[in-house]
Image (cartoon, grey):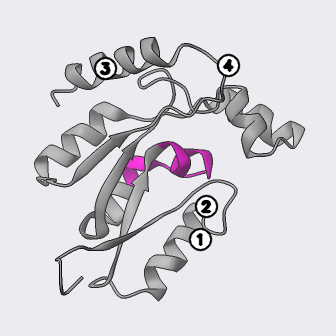
């Protein structure tokens, strides 16, 4: 950090030790905000039971990196009811193309622009080999992002 000016962020993740909003909150409370930021993954936050818009507002100053990922709540519900592990949920499309799930990207984009946010935004589309059409999906995700004004 001192030599290169790089900062460290923590990426909360389903199937990990910090995945729910409560666990994310505990991590943020127990760590130094000068030393550790948050990589807010919108899809994982929603899958963990949280509202990504509220997370963006709550941790605004600690969000140094963002992952644009959408979440299909119907698949999430089936995953919980049937006890699927993370990979089974992904295989069934829990992280759908941007704009097809429950994440309010229009509000997220508005908040990031108002802030203004100048860090990285990484688009993630979790798929398993043989699942879907990655190139076409990436193009649709890019078109969606353009419509958001990025």
Q: Earlier in the sequence, mark 1 or mark 3?
A: 1
Above/below status of 139 relative to 8:
above
**Discs 2/3, front:** 3
Total numbered badges shown on the rendered structure: 4
Which residue in the structure is indicated by mark 1? 23
Q: Which residues are magenta?
A: 43-54
Q: Residues within 10 Å of mark 1 (few under 14, many from 20)?
A: some
- When asked about the image quadrant of residue 65, the answer is bottom left
Q: Are marks 1 and 3 in contact (CB under 8 Å)?
A: no
Which residue in the structure is indicated by mark 2? 20
- When asked about the image quadrant of residue 95, the answer is top right
Q: Are marks 2 and 3 in contact (CB under 8 Å)?
A: no
Q: Earlier in the sequence, mark 2 or mark 4?
A: 2
Q: Disc 1 and disc 4: Cα gap in Å? A: 33 Å
Q: Residues within 10 Å of mark 2 (few under 14, many from 20)?
A: many
Residue sticking out furthest to the right = 82
Disc on res. 144 = 3
Q: Disc 2 and disc 1: Cα gap in Å? A: 5 Å
Q: Disc 2 and disc 4: Cα gap in Å? A: 29 Å
Residue sticking out furthest to the front = 3
Which residue in the structure is indicated by mark 4? 130
């Amino acid at each position: 950090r001192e030599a290169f000016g790089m900062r460290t962020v923590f990426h909360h993740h389903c199937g990990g030790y910090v995945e729910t909003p409560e666990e994310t909150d505990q991590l943020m409370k127990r760590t130094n905000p000068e030393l550790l930021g948050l990589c807010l993954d919108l899809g994982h936050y929603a899958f963990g039971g949280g509202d990504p818009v509220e997370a963006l507002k709550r941790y605004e100053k600690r969000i140094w990196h963002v992952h644009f990922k959408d979440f299909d709540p119907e698949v999430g519900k089936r995953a919980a009811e049937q006890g699927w592990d993370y990979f089974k949920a992904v295989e069934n499309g829990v992280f759908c193309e941007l704009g097809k799930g429950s994440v309010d990207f229009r509000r997220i984009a508005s908040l990031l622009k108002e802030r203004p946010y100048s860090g990285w935004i990484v688009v993630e589309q979790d798929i398993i080999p043989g699942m879907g059409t990655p190139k076409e999906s990436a193009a649709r995700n890019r078109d969606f992002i353009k419509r958001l004004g990025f």
